[in-house]
Image (cartoon, rainbow, N blue to C red):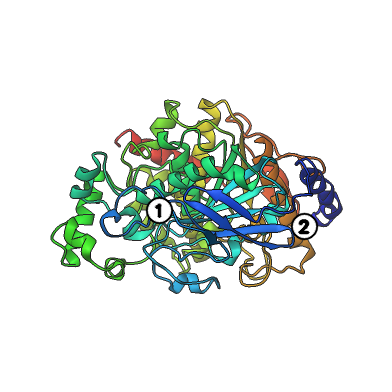
């Protein structure tokens, strides 16, 4: 069935979703709420009230730089919550292309709430958004992440800021000694602090603290995966959605290696110790960072485990329903140069020595066109698709809750080879067209129908732990013996994975790494 045929069907389930929430209109929208620290006042637009820039922790500045988030500093009177707070310290050049505000500050631990609830007794499902950006960039104020459209579907939408780059993920021997449990996971700790704030405060916005779904994309999806294995996050969420992110590969570096990298990083800045580094301006700390991915969350076995794959094998994870998936051309955004057959083979042998034979067999590369396509797909599997697929398998095998997987393959004249990394985001948030639409059109009926379909699934999942609902194509549960995914393209529906040979080749490679081969 085509997307156009779903347009009329989609109206029915969305109406049903909104009608299931208690409706008491005499009190009007929630314009003020008393939260940890004081009272905040939001802004209403089209029956949705937004509260922006609510502090959920103390500013991580001065002596609090490179420490776990501390309690909120209370304020007097009513805090105006009409504007986003500055984003975390980062290079703003990439974010500027997305059209959002580009103010950044080390004082960045704020969150935002969108709600259509009429009073604090409604108990709407809560969705908590975690942005991506390679753990080096990202902010809640991106127009793509505006939560109004999801709030209109009956959820309370929260977006949480977290420290990125060296402010969020610098490890150092002195910092590890200070904490007694490692260093370099501050950004993930920020996310956990945000979830604790949600648990203690979201009922005042008509949300249900016992029905919280975390969702994120790219680094945000990796974050969701880390939270799914975090003992500190246990009980703070009840469902999880990860878009293009899974933390199942071996860690990028051990704590000891990350500490050494951090020590050298501060040496470049002329800081002889952490006390001297904390005295440096935030802009100076940021200045030595070289691109996205320079810093990455460091496992400390407290915030999240060093060997997450093995933790899942042992059943040590937060067992909630999960909905996870990847896009068809994830690598197209990162691998843009042409590749020769010999160049591709040489790259694979150098990067994946122990598994190179199986990987080369799985990726056609007899011609330049094949090699170029395979280089992009290799990035897709290694960075996104295999970690997500492995997560689905392990959760299905060792968890009690359901697993749902998807494959996003919406193609346009500008993307004939498949859906790029992050291409699903405007559809998830319903923000098609304009600066947040990433090339989509609010006037395109197929794209509007696809967005309505995806939002329906995401909201249904947040409500019940199952994306299925009236009028929607059936989304099957993923199991090890029946590995079906929901395809999002011109003919949405369940299908076999198109990249199974490549997934299996990487599965063999990573199994060898875990075995020490």
User: Dot 2 corresponds to which residue?
Assistant: 449
343 displayed left or right of 11: left
Q: Quadrant of residue 489?
A: bottom right
- The single residue placed furthest to the left in the displayed view is 272
Tell me the number on the disc at residue 297. none
**Residue at (70, 46) in percent of width and height:** 119
**Residue at (77, 61) in percent of width and height:** 446
Can the viewer see residue 497?
A: no
Q: Position of residue 131 (x, y in %)?
A: 51, 56
Categorize mark 2 by other alpha carbons within 10 Å: few (<14), some (14-19), many (20+): many
> From what the image shows, is residue 263 above or below residue 511?
below
User: Dot 1 corresponds to which residue?
Assistant: 73
Q: Position of residue 337 (x, y in %)?
A: 45, 69
266 displayed left or right of 404: left
In the image shown, does 478 or 288 lie closer to the viewer?
288
> From what the image shows, is residue 485 above or below residue 313?
below
Q: Position of residue 216 (x, y in %)?
A: 53, 50
Categorize mark 1 by other alpha carbons within 10 Å: few (<14), some (14-19), many (20+): few
Q: Considering the image in quadrants, where does the C terminus appear? A: top left
């Amino acid at each position: 069935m085509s997307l156009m045929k779903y347009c009329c069907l989609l109206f029915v389930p969305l109406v049903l979703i909104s009608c299931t929430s208690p409706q008491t209109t005499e009190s009007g929208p929630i314009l003020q709420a008393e939260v940890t620290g004081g009272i905040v006042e939001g802004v209403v637009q089209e029956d949705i009230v937004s509260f922006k820039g609510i502090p959920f922790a103390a500013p991580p500045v001065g002596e609090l730089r490179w420490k776990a988030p501390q309690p909120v500093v209370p304020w007097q009177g009513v805090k105006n919550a009409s504007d986003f707070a500055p984003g975390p310290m980062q290079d703003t050049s990439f974010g500027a292309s997305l059209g959002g505000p580009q103010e950044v500050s080390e004082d960045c631990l704020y969150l935002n709430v969108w709600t259509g609830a009429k009073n604090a007794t409604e108990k709407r499902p809560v969705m908590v958004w975690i942005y991506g950006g390679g753990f080096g960039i990202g902010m809640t104020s991106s127009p793509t992440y505006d939560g109004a459209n999801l709030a209109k579907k009956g959820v309370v939408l929260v977006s949480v800021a977290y420290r990125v780059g060296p402010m969020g993920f610098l490890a150092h021997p002195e910092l590890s000694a200070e904490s007694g449990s490692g260093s370099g996971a501050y950004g993930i700790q920020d996310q956990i602090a945000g979830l604790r704030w949600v648990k203690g405060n979201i009922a005042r916005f008509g949300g249900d603290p016992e029905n919280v779904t975390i969702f994120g994309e790219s680094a945000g999806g990796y974050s969701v995966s880390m939270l799914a294995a975090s003992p500190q996050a246990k009980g703070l969420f009840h469902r999880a959605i990860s878009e293009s992110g899974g933390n199942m590969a071996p860690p990028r570096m051990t704590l000891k290696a990350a500490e050494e990298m951090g020590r050298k990083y501060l040496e470049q800045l002329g800081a002889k110790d952490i006390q001297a580094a904390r005295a440096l301006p935030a802009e100076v700390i940021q200045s030595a960072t070289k691109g996205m991915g320079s810093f990455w969350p460091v496992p400390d076995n407290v915030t999240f485990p060093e060997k997450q794959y093995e933790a899942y094998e042992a059943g040590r994870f937060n067992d909630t329903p999960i909905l996870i998936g990847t896009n068809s051309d994830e690598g197209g955004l990162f691998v843009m140069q042409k590749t020769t057959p010999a160049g591709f083979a040489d790259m694979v042998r150098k990067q994946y020595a122990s598994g190179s034979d199986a990987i080369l067999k799985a990726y056609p590369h007899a011609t330049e066109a094949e090699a170029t396509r395979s280089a992009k797909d290799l990035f897709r599997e290694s960075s996104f698709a295999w970690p997500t697929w492995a997560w689905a398998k392990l959760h299905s095998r060792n968890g009690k809750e359901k697993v749902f997987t998807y494959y996003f393959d919406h193609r346009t004249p500008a993307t004939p080879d498949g859906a790029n990394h992050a291409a699903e985001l405007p559809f998830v948030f319903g923000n098609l067209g304009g600066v947040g639409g990433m090339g989509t059109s609010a006037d395109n009926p197929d794209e509007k129908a696809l967005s309505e379909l995806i939002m329906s699934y995401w909201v249904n999942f947040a409500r019940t732990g199952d994306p299925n609902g009236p009028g929607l194509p059936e989304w099957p549960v993923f199991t090890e013996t029946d590995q079906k995914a929901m395809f999002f393209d011109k003919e949405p529906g369940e299908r076999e994975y198109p990249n199974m040979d490549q997934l299996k080749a990487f599965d063999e490679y990573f199994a060898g790494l875990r075995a020490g081969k």
